[in-house]
Image: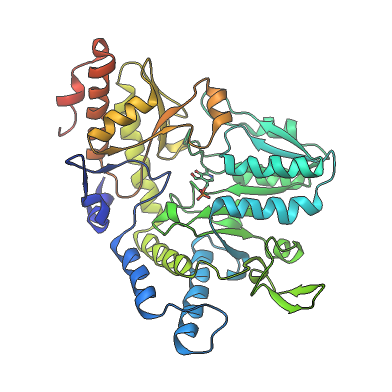
Amino acid sequence: MGLSARVRDEFPLLGQSAHGKPIVYLDSAATSQKPREVIDALVRYYEEYNANVHRGIYAIAEKATLAYEEARGKVAGFINARRPEEVVFTRGTTEAINLVAYAWGLHSLRAGDEIILTTMEHHSNLVPWQLIAGMTGARLKFWDFDGEGKISLEELDRLLTGRTRMVALAHQSNVLGTFNPVAEAARRARAAGALVLVDAAQSVPHMPVDVQQLGADFVAFSGHKMCGPTGIGALWARYEHLEALQPFHGGGEMIMLVELDRSTYKEPPWKFEAGTPNIAGAIVWGAAVDYLTRIGMEAIRAHEQQLTGYALVQLQEIKGLRIHGPKNPAERGGAIAFSMDGVHPHDIAQVLDQEGICVRAGHHCTQPLHRRLGVAATVRASLYLYNTADDIDALVRGLDKVLAYFAPSRRSGVGAEGRRGA
Ligand code: PLP
């Protein structure tokens, strides 16, 4: 699993320790760590050309504006957008989805119109639609997953009607890890006259994503999950949609002409970027895109697939541990949620924390999904380009400690000593 040996040293945080143990970071689905060159780009911006964008005509303001717009171009190139102007900077995936829900849904949906969502959606691709449905009288319909955590296109065909206006779904589930068939879903939904929004928060960071091939109308994703800073993300949309949509926020810099009682707006994407944007965030996200591009998204996906396969095999050997989601690493990403019979997820996370292992315990912003699984919470270990087989081995040894505390009779004895290289 060669990739990470090369890149791991580039992430300063991965050299830190917690509770006297080297940090094993397995929570990249929540947020990723940042390589040195991305951190340096942040310092360089604030030390050398911190100024507001699209306003000043002095040198550093022009440099900041140029860098901000260059970052838009980098993000657009990363997802193969037709043009940079199809990328609207937002605070992240959540704001990007809210932008569509309000700027499109509030103005376009009528009572009785239908919005189809899967039952595995993150709250950020569920709650905005609940709000808009409440305001417009539109109806939410749910596309459920099967026992393996997969959704079927036949079920989508059954749900689509002449009233379906929007199909919104995650590309990769942040809990089940499932890759959903978004391109085929987009083809079928658009053929039925609906728009399609893809929540790509867990796919753009982990695999090549080409928005033209996806064929959706809107794609939302976050910078902080792909080695960039927090507080920045994007909505990609077909340009004709951005032209047709109403602004989401009003304020400075999104206008052409302001009268006391009305205004005209700039062209997209700027009409959606009211106020001082997250300039540092966008520029530094551009540095993260450069970093990931240099490593190569194919190589990152191959590394994660291999490591996910290894993790699934190792975890399934632990007695009483159940993985939620597909078991074939080709069908899923590296967000791996699991339950251990008789042990509370928070207890698991706490024991692992004492070993320096960072995992997440809880509902991971997917309460309906957890209800559907019949559990209140799960533990989630999630992988990225810097993780190694040693990290998985550390997790398995940590879980053996969990068994030692909470279910000693289930210990197989291999957890602490018998694993690869341990
Ligand atoms: N959608 C999915 C699938 C996610 O995993 C996340 C974050 O965990 C989000 C949306 C929300 O992203 P953000 O908090 O960056 O807006």
* Farthest top residue in view: 409
* Front in this rendered view, residue 105 or 250: 250
Residue 153, by quadrant, is top right
Residue at the image position 36 percent from the left and 19 percent from the top: 343
Residue at the image position 69 percent from the left and 34 percent from the top: 156
Is the N terminus in the top left, top right, bottom left or bottom right quadrant?
Answer: top left
* Front in this rendered view, residue 388 or 374: 374
Q: Is residue 344 left or right of residue 158?
A: left
* Front in this rendered view, residue 77 or 358: 358
- In percent of width and height, residue 222 lies at 50, 54
Is the C terminus in the top left, top right, bottom left or bottom right quadrant?
Answer: top left
* Farthest front residue in view: 260
Residue 347, by quadrant, is top left
351 over 112 or under it: above or below: above
The reply to whether residue 219 is in sight is no
* Front in this rendered view, residue 357 or 383: 357
Residue 256, by quadrant, is bottom right
Q: Tell how many labels.
A: 0
113 over 67 or under it: above or below: above
- In percent of width and height, residue 149 lies at 53, 28
329 over 75 or under it: above or below: above
56 over 418 or under it: above or below: below
Q: Is residue 159 left or right of residue 371?
A: right
